[in-house]
Image (tube, rainbow, N blue to C red):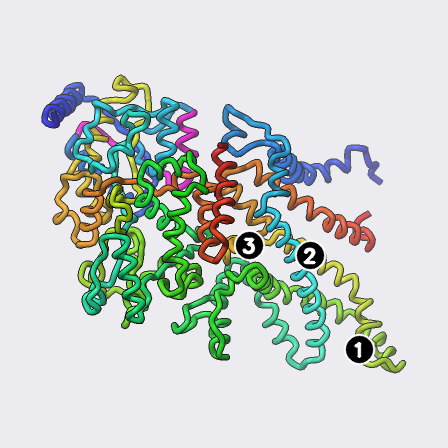
Amino acid sequence: MRKAMLVLLCLVVFAGVGFSQQKTVYVMHGWPGQQAVAFAKVVQAFMEAYPDINVVTEIVGRDRPAILATRLAAGNPPDVSPIPWLGLMAEWARAGYLVPLDGLVDVSEQIPALTPLGYVDGKLYGTWQSANVKSLVWYNVKAFVEKGYQVPTTWDELIALCDRIVADGGVPWSIGLESGAASGWPGTDWIEDIMLRTAGPEVYDQWVNHEIPWTDPAVVEAWEKFGQIALNPAYVLGGPVGALTTNFGDAGAPLFTDPPQAYLLKQATFIQSFILNQKPDLVPGEDFAVFPFPPIDPKFGTPVLGGGDVSVVFNTGGPLNGTREEVITFVQFLSSVKAQEIWARELGEMAANKNIDPVATYPDPIARAAWQMLLTADSFRYDGSDLMPGAVGAGSFWQGVLDYVSGVPLKTVLDYIESTAVDAYGY
Amino acid sequence: MLKTKKWHPWVFVGPALLILTFFFVYPAVATIWRSFYGSGQELFGPNVRHVGLANWRYVFTNPTMTRALRNNALWVGVFTPVTVGLGLILAVLLDRVKYERVLKSIIFVPAAISYVGASIIWRFVYAYRPVGLSQIGVLNALVVALGGEPQGWLILRPWVNNLLLIAVGIWIWTGFSMVIFSAAYKNIPRDLLEASRIDGANEFQVFRRVTLPLLRPTAEVVGVTMVVQVLKVFDIVYVMTNGNYETEVVANRMYKEMFNFFNYGRASAIAVVLLLMLIPFMILNVRRLAGQGGVQ
């Protein structure tokens, strides 16, 4: 199939040369600095492989949803755009702005857990450019070895480990919820990760779409499990006050003092650069490592919470479902092993293609472990607070986390978020 | 002499009126109009939705908004008397000190620091580290040195954190208030003060019966300026707590509704409320100017 496709693509290429027409693909992305450079390298590799296709890249760093909406309304969208907004993708797909890619783009090489999220109403609209993993717990390897601690593989083992650390006179968790005007978001990741493990991906989706209320027992349980750790003064460095006043970026440092002030940190892949920035001598994999946030209900296994970018193709009125051959060639290339290896190697981000060579691509064992987690994940879900309307996902949810950890009764917190959700979703 | 035609004044007033219309009247009217409509998309998209008084109901009934309104009242109630009072006392007392200029300069410096800069400085002052770790915040370092327990000051709701935020505002504005009072105090004819002292008044009586009445117009101007400043308070709250832990204020709520939640209608309603709160003080200021012959 793939070979046939390549042959077809080659034919297209030759046909293009034959007619000596320069074909152009217009792509718009919003990545700054390093990511923009990595994408440029991917584009360069594409143009070397397909010399007759020219790619014009447009970078829109701010207000991209608004700009895309305007361009769509005006009828001149770009051909391709990698976007991190799955909600918008669904909205645009239903409005007919996007090209269904079934039968045009082959996604069989994509990591299985990611693929379903590219679909809207049973049709494929998005292919994954890259993903990041949030369901990670960071720990100090040497301290673990010294104390004889084992990496926990279930929630009960995790709590048992916490109790053991407390019994040894230590503090298990370093939590940082402070993040300036975005304070509270690290707590939303906790609750989402727990909810995926206690209620499963389907209920999680219902919750994100507000098909179940915030006062639903499944939601309450996730918050209470979060509270079991975050509200316990013995479990958290500085207790709840410490969690509220510590910046998320500084939360890694206490793991690496001597003796460690805390032993565990739950945070996404990006925190590695923060840790190395503060403690440049640490070696990833030797001094610190990650384990998956453990499963709770065995029924739901080990899901992965994360984020990422999906490439969507806009309807520009071409012959192929509304687009052109060269655009499809480009989108197929973006998810190919070659493009994905360039992207992942440049940025240390998680490749979305399962056939890449992890050893050659990821020089450090943590990125490799995170990618392995993504590859074997029982399910993948997008960070829910990013999918909810701003008034909830970037408003009352954040505020609710801070209120709950600072001692407001859970019922008051959830009633308030529910009232803002009813208001923001309109149902 | 040139004869004044009817249209002559308009040549001079016209440009100013045009600019005012474009940059003030039009936005104000548009904001009021928008406050009766739904969020941004609905306002400009195909489903324009008139929501009647819903945004206004929200402003006066939503618990976060009522908290913001109450906090604004707290800011006015604490910030204004303290900045005016401290400014007055410092101006009168420093007048008798040898190093007046140096001291006044030091107290005035915060006025030259931006709100955001000042807020970041004070975040460090209030910073919290768990018991046992070295405190990086001055306030907690003092508390610990005196044998106390470190506190997460900015999350001690609702009184401590709000008052500590107001303290930052006072720190910024007291110098300004002092400088104005100082100028006014130095304009009081010395013979008036001398005469009262010769008549047997003690220093307190001089202050109470002579200085204070003469500084009253200044106090009113400074007071109104402070109220106008404080009703618009945004930066300190945005930087230090972002309105969490019951420290929300009206302007910060407006910012969130507008730029985080894209709810243009609600943000507009809040903006209009803010404008309505400010208008009485504007009128007061204009009246006073008129009374002094500045405006006919």
Work out whether A221 lies above or below B132.
above
Q: Is residue B26 left or right of residue B128?
A: right
Q: Chain of mark 1?
A: B
Q: CA gap, disc 2 to disc 1?
A: 27 Å
Q: Chain of mark 3?
A: B
Which labelled disc corresponds to residue B246?
A: 3
Q: Residue at x 39, y 38 (%)?
A: A208
Tell which tag, 2 or 3, sits nearer the viewer. Answer: 3
Tell me which label, 2 or 1, sits earlier in the chain.
Answer: 1
- Residue that mark 1 sits on: B204
Where's residue A203, x and y in %?
35, 37
Q: Residue at x 45, y 46 (%)?
A: A397
- Asked whether the beta carbons under mark 2 and mark 1 sit within 8 Å of each other, the answer is no
Where's residue B236, x and y in %?
54, 57
Amino acid found under the numbered disc labelled 2: Thr
Tell which tag, 2 or 1, sits nearer the viewer. Answer: 1
Which labelled disc corresponds to residue A115?
A: none
Tell me which label, 2 or 3, sits earlier in the chain.
Answer: 2
Q: Nearer the viewer, residue A75 or A396?
A: A396
Where's residue B65, x and y in %?
59, 46
- Residue that mark 2 sits on: B225
Q: Chain of mark 2?
A: B
SS class, disc 2? helix
Region rendered in magenta: A51-73
Q: Residue furthest right?
A: B199
Tell which tag, 1 or 3, sits nearer the viewer. Answer: 3
Q: Is residue A25 left or right of residue B18?
A: left
